[in-house]
Image (spheres, helix red, strand yellow):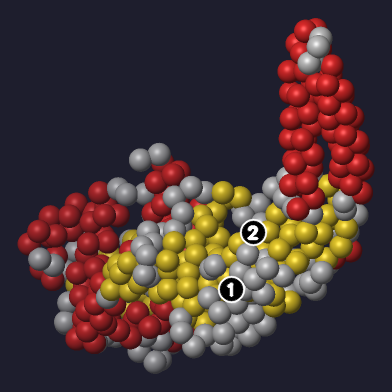
Amino acid sequence: MSEATANWPILLGLQQRALAAADEAELAFLIGNETWHLLPYKQAAVFLIDSFGRPQLKVVSGLVSALEDTPFTLWAARVCSMLLNDPASNAEARRLTALSLPIELREGWGEWWPENALYQPLTTPAGKPVGVVIYVRDEAWRDDELELLKLLHGHYAYCLNTFRKNRPLLADLWHKLKAQPKRLKMIAIGIAAALLMPVPLSVIAPAEIIALKAEMVSAPTEGVVKTFHVQPNQPVKQGQVLFSLDDTTLRNRRDIATQALAVARSDALAVGQKSFDNLQSKSELAGLLGKVREKESELAYIDELLGRIDVQASHDGVFIYGDPNDWIGKPVTTGERIAQLVQPDDLGVLVWVPVGDAITLEAGASMRVYLQVSPLNALSATLIETSYLATLSPESVASYRIRGKLSEGESAHIGLRGVAKVYGSWRPFIYWVMRRPLGALRQWIGL
């Protein structure tokens, strides 16, 4: 029985153990330390190729760990990289000596390795490299030994490839591109060009359709809302009465003021008649006349307040407010907002841009408005007003309040809500991608 035939049971045993390996680390340990039972060697270095086609030293027989950067592991990694990039290396095993290496690597050979080495690639049947094993010993490697190692390492490569089937597709794509340098170079140029391509900065924020020409209709004086003469969202004409406040209190005050004025005038008239022959009455007359003027002023003021009871439209427009029942009988203060009188033909959009999403915006910037009632149809608008001071939005978020004007031909109803996309200045695409991460990083590191 030949030596090769006698090694068949060991070969089959190693293949079975490779199939039973739980992961790449266990299989790499088996390759580096247990292959010795098939063919003796002094040392084995197992390299596995990562997703970017680089060899990573995983196991060195006789060492507890090969992950540390020692002079030997660094030198062995350089040797493996050189052999992988050498055109003379292919999917077949290759005998090596110190003369096979460049001059700068030969010195390490005599320090760490014996005379003969074997470069054994781990290649799948499809020709995909998954690793490299370098065996070293004093004796030269025979042809029959290379045949045994070829059978065993083909099995090792199959098992390694099985562990890597779940790797991301990016890794396989990288291997294919690496085999085509021209295509890889063209893709790199294309990516660089795409990253430098100018794109407009933009921000998406909550928006509401508003009237640009809107007048606040407020309570002219303190009182209680009595009635509305106009229904919500109804067109009105200039001078038309919109709503009225309750006048009961003012009417009573006017009656009292009228009576007080009559009494003051009567007292002044009586004293005036006495003043012709009574010097004391003449001195009292000036005070009584002043009291008359006071009562007249009070009555005039009450009449002025009564004139404000009925609130009229200052111009044509649409009278916008909520449910009348929410206001009737409600006490209001002077200047309290009750409704809006708007021009429905001059529509715009009010946008609340959160402080964290803000970009530099200039008047004239283009806007796209997507309403909730029609999310597939965008309205075009132009930015006309920006805010320098952040305030709380209706959602209680610190935001900048900006306004835009709808373009000609665009129509919508006041009060409709949605989102608006506001476009800013043009920047390279890489700036658009990295703007937020860089901003967060600067806040985190404080630079």
52 vs 421, nearest the viewer: 421
153 vs 232, nearest the viewer: 232
Residue under label 2, please give it.
216
Amino acid type for the residue under numbered disc 2: Met
- Label 1 or label 2, whichever comes before in sequence order: 2
Q: Residue furthest top?
A: 280
Q: Residue furthest left?
A: 103
* SS for dot 1: loop
258 vs 250, nearest the viewer: 258
How many other residues sit within 10 Å of disc 2, few (<14), some (14-19) or many (≥20)? some
Return the mark for residue 85.
Answer: none
One can see residue 383 in this view: yes
The residue at the point 43 percent across, 73 percent down is: 382
* SS for dot 2: strand
The residue at the point 7 percent across, 62 percent down is: 103
Task: Tell me: 109 left or right of 435.
Answer: left
The residue at the point 43 percent across, 68 percent down is: 383
92 vs 170, nearest the viewer: 170
Residue under label 1, please give it.
343
Task: Tell me: 198 left or right of 122.
Answer: left
Height in image: 283 above or below 77?
above
